[in-house]
Image: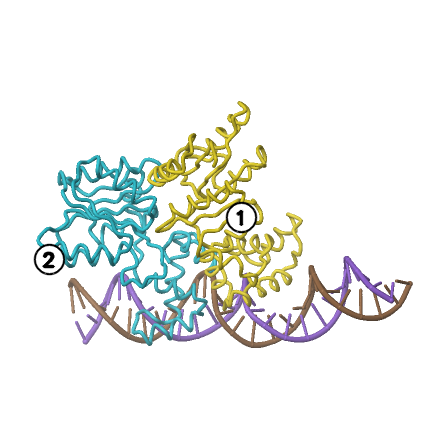
Chain colours: A cyan, B yellow, C purple, D brown
Amino acid sequence: MFNKVLIAEDLDTISIAIVQALETLSITEIHHTKYCDDALLKLKKALHDNVPYDLVISDLSFKVDHRENKLTSGEELIEAIKKVQPGIKTVIFSIEDKSFRIKSLFNNLGINAYVCKGRDSIQELQAAIQRISNNEEVIVSNELALALRDKTIFEIESYDIILLKSLAKGQTLDEISSEFKDSRIQPNGSSSLEKRINRLKIYFKANNNVHLIAITKDLGLI
Amino acid sequence: MFNKVLIAEDLDTISIAIVQALETLSITEIHHTKYCDDALLKLKKALHDNVPYDLVISDLSFKVDHRENKLTSGEELIEAIKKVQPGIKTVIFSIEDKSFRIKSLFNNLGINAYVCKGRDSIQELQAAIQRISNNEEVIVSNELALALRDKTIFEIESYDIILLKSLAKGQTLDEISSEFKDSRIQPNGSSSLEKRINRLKIYFKANNNVHLIAITKDLGLI
DNA sequence: TTTGCTTTTACGGAAACCCGTAAACTTCTT
DNA sequence: AAGAAGTTTACGGGTTTCCGTAAAAGCAAA
């Protein structure tokens, strides 16, 4: 089992429960931060002092408040952590249940487990930690496993995200077209943009641009 | 101080912390449910047995799972509760921080306090409960108080919400027009709909319909 | 270099939007 | 009952989206 664990979770209510859950796993050193920046700092310090953490458990979204922070999300935090301590084990513990986003967490960040906050998430979290410490393979909490195996999930590129965000900002196709030309983003012909949007509309079963933006916003894609 | 309190909160991690917070206020009877339907049932039972609850603390959003539920949100739960036990005190404890929505909770549901889940929410929750038990007036957790006093907040009617939701569903103005005629919603001329949408676009500084929907979705209005 | 395939771009017409103006209808006052 | 004020609807024309077709450009294999 792990010895030293770092928790990044802003909600006081939740962090209490996580700490309790870890204590029952007889983990001796449990540290907790409410901000991503603090978590990275603690991790660097521990590494420097030769008493590194074995495991990080992080939320995805952190509330913004008066404090200025460099890292504003769990994704950014994990990315930064992997740069300074690539071998560390990571668990995401979040309310997010959109398969799109979770899939990208495994693919892009290489997390070891994803546990979805829910009605029995403490058990799931404990089980996930157990399995990671036994070096079992990547772990997804129950209901999500199915969604992720679904290979039909359309591969949305960052290009599509930029395009959708531009639309959501109220720009016309011509405006987006010239913006893309300025930023050297291709394809940038207004006709190609149309075609790309059309692909998205077909995939998401959207009647028109308004519908498309509503759907992708609901999915948390933009 | 209250004697008998009911908590409706789906996330196991959070409910643990709430229960602990209430225990330190020396509240003797604390009950907890993970589903809105169960909460209403418990409340009815207690009322029938002549040992009613004094206070309800509820989350706003509840995860959907395998179970079929009549009540799917904290709003619906509070509304149902007020029908069977109008005098009961109610607190909403949620992550939601959109002033539009919170304002409507006070106006439409008549809740006694709104506490926003955050980095120091346990203290705030305890303070709110204290104040309610002393019969002090309506309570909003700190940062929100300012937003709510802002009288400039545009009065969005339910008509506007329906209109925006129809747009977000991808319907055209003509489709919405005939739908409104069927549902006896007025005004329903496609020209009037345009005018109304235009008012919203001016208020929200939206360039076009796509932009308008993106903005209002971000605000949690739809 | 040619051939075939894919991607990108261009074009054109129909539909939906955007926006201003004006007519028709309500409602209220006198 | 007539007029004023406000609301709802109709209409017209410019812009943008929407959608099909086709040309141009890029690329790989022969």
Report the residue marked by disc 1: B138
Relative to A12, A26 lies left or right: left
Return the residue nearer the eye: B183 or A101. A101
Tag of residue A32: none
Kindly state the secondary structure of the residue where label 2 is placed. helix
Q: CA distance from mark 1 to mark 2?
A: 50 Å
Q: Report crowding for label 1: few under 14, some 14 to 19, many 20 or more residues within 10 A (C-alpha).
A: some
Furthest-left residue in this view: A50
Return the residue nearer the eye: A114 or B177. A114
Tag of residue A48: 2
Viewer-side label of 1, 2: 1
Give the image location of residue B219, x and y in percent. 47, 57
Relative to B98, A27 lies left or right: left
Give the image location of residue B6, x and y in percent. 45, 34
Residue at 63 percent across and 52 percent down: it is B180
Return the residue nearer the eye: A19 or B202. A19
Q: Up-down: is D21 above or below B130?
A: below
Disc 2 is attached to a residue of which chain?
A: A
Q: Looking at the picture, which amino acid does disc 1 mark?
A: Val
Q: Looking at the picture, which amino acid does disc 2 mark?
A: His
Residue B194 quadrant:
bottom right
Report the number of numbered marks: 2
Disc 1 is attached to a residue of which chain?
A: B
Q: Up-down: is B139 above or below A41?
A: above
Residue at 57 percent across and 37 percent down: it is B82
Return the residue nearer the eye: B91 or B165. B91
Residue at 64 percent across and 47 percent down: it is B183
Kindly state the secondary structure of the residue where label 1 is placed. loop
